[in-house]
Structures are given as structure tokens and as C-alpha cells.
């Protein structure tokens, strides 16, 4: 009986340990101070060239993904937010505001700006490249439009109009785009061929959708939400229905889905303690069921994210020192002031 009991206990431990190991295995792999001047927004990874691109207001830092060393700094820009990489035409594209929207084009080999594309739009913010349509889609928040760029010709080839301010967008890889309409808590479904909104659907209980990611195999859309409830939601892209939601940290501005592991990463400014940021990681057990596998804390303010699908590591950026700001009548809970001398990159993986 004793030997049988021991065998049963050993078997139970073996069943439990993989789950514990899986959940606890995500951690901060490396954190490196980069310093430098300027704010920051989106971060982009080129997994083939092992480069991380970080816009800093007036310049783009090019960082070696493996060593975290700065290998280039591309100057001469204004009001920049995001970078899209198109290796097949050896070009990178940077959203800027100078003061109206402009796209800076740079050479991936020389890291030099080669041209500018004027959009004439307001609040030129995030962007993404869709290989299926071979187009770059630029999100112009205040203009409530997306500028469409042909990367080979480096010129504007169209404009998509929306019914409200927008945030991140993503492609389903089959000619449809999904774009967050941040003020209305809705998602616009866009026909990439006609450059028109086909329909909109509610993302509630999400109030303000920011980051967006897509699971092409199961056609699930992931939205990082701010507002009264800090949550991530999962939407069936075919029905427009929310099929799952999960609590996350506050101030999330990014989400990525790793098709290789089935894990979803939400990067959040605040873990809830007012002192640290966090990436909340969930595993896709099935298209409509998600289990939390890890909460990895790091420095406060790291809220955007990029994934390397080859290493399955994610990257975020922010400052490790953030000075308190005195409250005012207009703002009783102001965010702390970042110290740019402590600007850093953080890498999370297994």
C-alpha cells in the first residue's frame, strides 16, 4: 500500500510540475540601460536581422537584439511614433509629425533617411506592414484615417476613413483589417481591397481599445483595453462577438500573440502597485479559453511591445526612474515624470 501511495504521489507531482514550470518560466531575460534623449512609443523587432527599432521623438535607435547594444542612431525626424520594416525593399518607414503627418523612409543597411512622404493628416501614430496586400497602413488618430503606403514605390496609394479616432490595427492575412476605434469602444472591419469600412462591432466590456493582435489559425482578435476596467478581450473575427476577457494591468498599449507557443502577452504601464510595469501572459487553451501562465514585473511605464517569433521573446521600453509629480486641481493623480537618463530596454522570455 505504501509503495502504491508513493507511486500515486509521484505521478501527481509529475503532472503538477510541468504546469508550475510552464507558468513560472517566463522572466526578465535581460534589461539594459540605453539612455538618450526623447520620449518613446512603439517598439519594433526585425527577427531576421536581429534588430530592435526604437523611435525617440526626433531619432530612431537601432539596437542589437541579442546584446542590447546601440548599433546606430537615425537622426533628423520630428514627432515620431512607430517603425515598420519591409526587408524585401530594404526600407524602414517611420511615422512622424512635422507638424502634419509625414512618413520618413530609411535604408535598412545604411540607416540613413532617404526620403519623406507627406500625408497631410493629423496625429500620424502607429503603423503596420501587411505582407498579404504588400501595403503599409498608417494610423492617423485625430484625422480618423489610415494612410496607405506602397513600400516599393514609397508613395501614398490611398486613404481609409473612419467614424472616430483610432488606435492600433492588424491584418487577418486574407485581405481584411481590424482597427480599434478608441473613443467608441468598437472595432472597424476594413476591406483592404476597396479601402472601406465594411462594418463595426462592439468590443465591450472593453471601453478603450489600444493594442491589437491576431491569431490567424483560429481567427481570434486580441485587444488591449484601457478605461475603467483594465482588461484584455478576445473577439471572434468572423462573428464580431467577444468570446473571452481577462484582467490585466492598467495602461496597456500593446498586445502580441505568439503562434508558435499559443501565448498572448499584454504589456501594461502599471502592475497595480504604482511602482512597476507588468506583462500579463495567457495561454490559448482553445480559441475561446485562456489561462494565465505568468505575470512578469519590470520597470514602471513599459507599455508597448514587440515579439520575436523565432526566439519567442518580447521587448518593451521605458524609464527605470520616474519622479513623482505634484497633483493639481485638474489632475489629482498625475503620472510620474520619466527620467530619460534611465531609458532602458527589457526582454522577457523563457
Image (tube, rainbow, N blue to C red):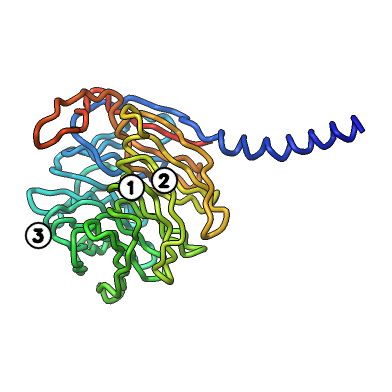
Q: Count residues near mark 3 (Cα–Cα under 10 Å), then give few for <14, some for 14-19, many for 20+.
A: some
Cα separation between marks 1 and 3: 35 Å
Task: Say few, some or many: other residues with alpha carbon within 10 Å of mark 2 (under 14 / 14 to 19 / 20 or more).
Answer: few
Front one among 285 and 204? 204
Residue drawn at point x = 29 percent, y = 66 percent = 188
Of mark 3 and mark 2, the one earlier in the sequence is 3
**Which is nearer the eye, 309 or 327?**
327
Q: Which residue is mark 3?
A: 120
Q: Quadrant of residue 202?
A: bottom left
Taking the spot 23% from the left edge, 49% from the top edge, the residue there is 94
The residue that disc 2 covers is 247
Name which of mark 1 and mark 3 comes first in the sequence. Answer: 3
Front of the two marks 3 and 2: 2
Check disc 3 and report its element: helix, strand or loop.
loop
- Indicate the position of residue 169 as horizontal and vertical percent values: 31, 58
Q: Which residue is mark 1?
A: 229
Secondary structure under tag 2 reads strand
Q: Is label 1 in contact with label 2 (beta carbons under 8 Å)?
A: yes
Q: Secondary structure at mark 1?
A: loop
Residue 136 visible in this rendered orientation of the protein: no
Q: Which numbered dot is residue 114?
A: none
Left/right placement of residue 343 relative to residue 260 reads left
In the rendered view of the protein, which quadrant contains the N terminus? Answer: top right
At 48% from the left edge and 48% from the top edge, which residue is drawn?
Answer: 309
Which residue appears farthest toward the left when viewing the image? 99
Residue 144 rendering spot, x and y as whole percentages: 17, 62
Amino acid at each position: 500500500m505504501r509503495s502504491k501511495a508513493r507511486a500515486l504521489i509521484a505521478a501527481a507531482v509529475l503532472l503538477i510540475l510541468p504546469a508550475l514550470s510552464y507558468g513560472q518560466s517566463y522572466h526578465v531575460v535581460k534589461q539594459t540601460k540605453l539612455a538618450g534623449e526623447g520620449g518613446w512609443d512603439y517598439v519594433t523587432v526585425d527577427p531576421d536581422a536581429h534588430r530592435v527599432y526604437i523611435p525617440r521623438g526626433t531619432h530612431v535607435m537601432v539596437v542589437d537584439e541579442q546584446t542590447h547594444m546601440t548599433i546606430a542612431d537615425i537622426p533628423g525626424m520630428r514627432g515620431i511614433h512607430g517603425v515598420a520594416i519591409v526587408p524585401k525593399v530594404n526600407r524602414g518607414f517611420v511615422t512622424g509629425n512635422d507638424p502634419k503627418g509625414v512618413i520618413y523612409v530609411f535604408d535598412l543597411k545604411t540607416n540613413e533617411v532617404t526620403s519623406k512622404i507627406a500625408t497631410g493628416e493629423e496625429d500620424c501614430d502607429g503603423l503596420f506592414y501587411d505582407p498579404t496586400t504588400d501595403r503599409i497602413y498608417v494610423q492617423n488618430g485625430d484625422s480618423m484615417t489610415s494612410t496607405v503606403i506602397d513600400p516599393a514605390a514609397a508613395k501614398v496609394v490611398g486613404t481609409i476613413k473612419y467614424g472616430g479616432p483610432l488606435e492600433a490595427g492588424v491584418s487577418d492575412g486574407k485581405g481584411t483589417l481590424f482597427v480599434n476605434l478608441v473613443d467608441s469602444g468598437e472595432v472597424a472591419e476594413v476591406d483592404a481591397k476597396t479601402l472601406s469600412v465594411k462594418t463595426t462591432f462592439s468590443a465591450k466590456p472593453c471601453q478603450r481599445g489600444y493594442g491589437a493582435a491576431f491569431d490567424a489559425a483560429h481567427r481570434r482578435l486580441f485587444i488591449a483595453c484601457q478605461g475603467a476596467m483594465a482588461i484584455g478581450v478576445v473577439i471572434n473575427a468572423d462573428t464580431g462577438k467577444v468570446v473571452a476577457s481577462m484582467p490585466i494591468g492598467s495602461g496597456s498599449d500593446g498586445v502580441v500573440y505568439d503562434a508558435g507557443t499559443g501565448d498572448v502577452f499584454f504589456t501594461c504601464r502599471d502592475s497595480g502597485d504604482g511602482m512597476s510595469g507588468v506583462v500579463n501572459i495567457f495561454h490559448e487553451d482553445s480559441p475561446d479559453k485562456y489561462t494565465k501562465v505568468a505575470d512578469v514585473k519590470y520597470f514602471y511605464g513599459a507599455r508597448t511591445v514587440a515579439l520575436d517569433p523565432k526566439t519567442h521573446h518580447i521587448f518593451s521600453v521605458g524609464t527605470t526612474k520616474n519622479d513623482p509629480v505634484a497633483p493639481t486641481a485638474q489632475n489629482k493623480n498625475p503620472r510620474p515624470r520619466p527620467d530619460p537618463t534611465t531609458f532602458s530596454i527589457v526582454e522577457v522570455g523563457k
